[in-house]
Amino acid sequence: MVEAACGQCQFGMKGNGCDLAVRIDGNAYFVDGTSIDSHGDAHANDGFCAKIRKAEVLGKIVENRYKVTSFKLVPIK
């Protein structure tokens, strides 16, 4: 289980535009293998640019990026 959000808008990462990132043990990594737009409107009230969401992920950190093989958002309650 990780925190997922827009790296630039929510985690303060440097980048070009809005990109999906995950935060693991306090460290944020941009994600490869899925995109910010694959999980709804990033700029909606519950989107990645507005909120940090929980996600169940599988993958590994390679060269300071998270290479995802599975990404499932946890529904907001």
Image (cartoon, rainbow, N blue to C red):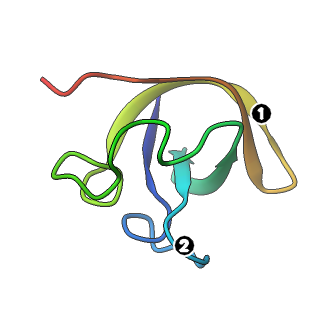
Q: Which residue is mark 1?
A: 60
Element under disc 1: strand
Q: Earlier in the sequence, mark 1 or mark 2?
A: 2
The front one of 50 and 12 is 50
Amino acid type, label 1: Lys
Q: Quadrant of residue 34?
A: top right
Q: How far across and down, in percent of the image, does residue 11 sit?
A: 44, 65
Q: How far across and down, in percent of the image, does residue 45 sit?
A: 15, 52
Q: 76 left or right of 3? A: left
Q: How far across and down, in percent of the image, does residue 77 sit?
A: 12, 23
Q: CA distance from mark 1 to mark 2?
A: 19 Å
Q: 24 left or right of 31? A: left
Amino acid type, label 2: Met
Which label number is shown at residue 32? none
Q: What residue is rendered at 61% in x and 76% in y? A: 15
Which label number is shown at residue 13? 2
Q: 42 left or right of 77? A: right
Is the Cβ of the residue at disc 1 closer than 8 Å to that at disc 2? Answer: no
Location of residue 23 with respect to 11 vertically, above or below: above
